[in-house]
Amino acid sequence: MGLFGKFIAKIKGTAHASVADWDELEASLLEADLGPHLSAEVVRAARSAKAENAEEAILNTLRLALSKKSRALIRASEGTTAVLVVGVNGTGKTTSAAKLAASLSTQDSRVLLAAADTFRAAAVDQLQTWGERLDIDVIHGAPNADPASVAFDAAQQGLARNMDYLVIDTAGRLHNKNDLMAELGKVRRVIEKVMPVQEVLLVVDATTGQNALAQAKVFAESVEVTGLILTKLDGSARGGIALAIEQSLDIPIKFIGTGESATDFAPFEPEIYIQGLL
């Protein structure tokens, strides 16, 4: 049964829920990573409604927490659309870049990938493997090449080859936040010598709970994040972090990853997600 299902079933047909019931609901919300602020709002809305209206009160509160911004991928008015994929290592960043490219290519778009996470050799190899599997070209440099140089080369090739999209995987080291953000800024600047960057998609791992919100705040403060890719959102209770991020930062989740294959990637559907919680 969903996150709220047992609670709704318990209070329907009763005049009042007990204090223990409300405490149980709030504890469940916190465990699901909705965060203390949104959890308190949901409980307050449910308590102020009649028992038969509690479900609708909860739904409305969850809907209000969602960002009202468009979830569509921003397209360039002409030429190649450049998409930066950012995030810390371990969130599924490189895999998400490949899945996004695969998704775009199925829409009859010409897509180019760029392996600009050059500080991690495994990331370059991983993206090249994905490229071979998906039949999508991957631009890369020599081992330990300058990430901005790789990104610049990819932007030039994207333009010369008349690509619809250029998807760029970036470095994800967070042991020194200032260095990482400076590197991302440099990558963006060199790309924009060739074409504007339309999207900066931040990849966050839903299973890391409130740490995902902390990561999103760091990146939102430092780079112009336009959307989120939420990985490992496989129906587990921890998926509540999606709402916490949107309410706190007003950055729309645009895509979700739910598995390892290229097809385990889809646009984020807020209403389906909320109904799933229930």
Image (cartoon, helix red, strand yellow):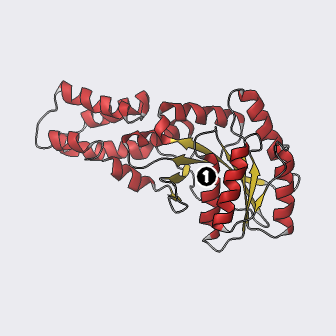
Q: Nearer the viewer, residue 166 or 79?
A: 166
The three-letter code of the residue at mark 1 reads: Thr
Q: Residue 105, percent across and down?
A: 64, 69
Q: Is residue 80 above or below residue 39?
A: below
Number of marks: 1
Corner quadrant of residue 17:
top left
Q: Nearer the viewer, residue 39 or 264?
A: 264
Q: Residue 139, percent across and down?
A: 79, 58
Q: Nearer the viewer, residue 264 or 156?
A: 264
Corner quadrant of residue 134:
bottom right
Task: Point out the residue furthest to the bottom here.
Answer: 108
In screen coordinates, is 53 left or right of 151? left
Residue drawn at x 65%, y 59% as measured from the top left: 130
Q: How busy is the neighbourhood of tag 1: few (under 14 within 10 Å), some, or many (20 plus)?
A: many
Q: Which residue is mark 1?
A: 95
Q: Nearer the viewer, residue 146 or 274?
A: 146
Residue drawn at x 36%, y 46% as measured from the top left: 60
In screen coordinates, is 12 left or right of 222? left
Q: Residue 107, percent across and down?
A: 61, 72
Q: Is residue 228 above or below residue 183?
A: below
Residue 244 is at least partly visible in this image: no
Q: Residue 45, percent across and down?
A: 31, 36
Residue 5 is at least partly visible in this image: yes
Q: Is residue 215 above or below residue 277?
A: above
Residue drawn at x 80%, y 46% as measured from the top left: 188
Secondary structure state at the residue bearing disc 1:
helix
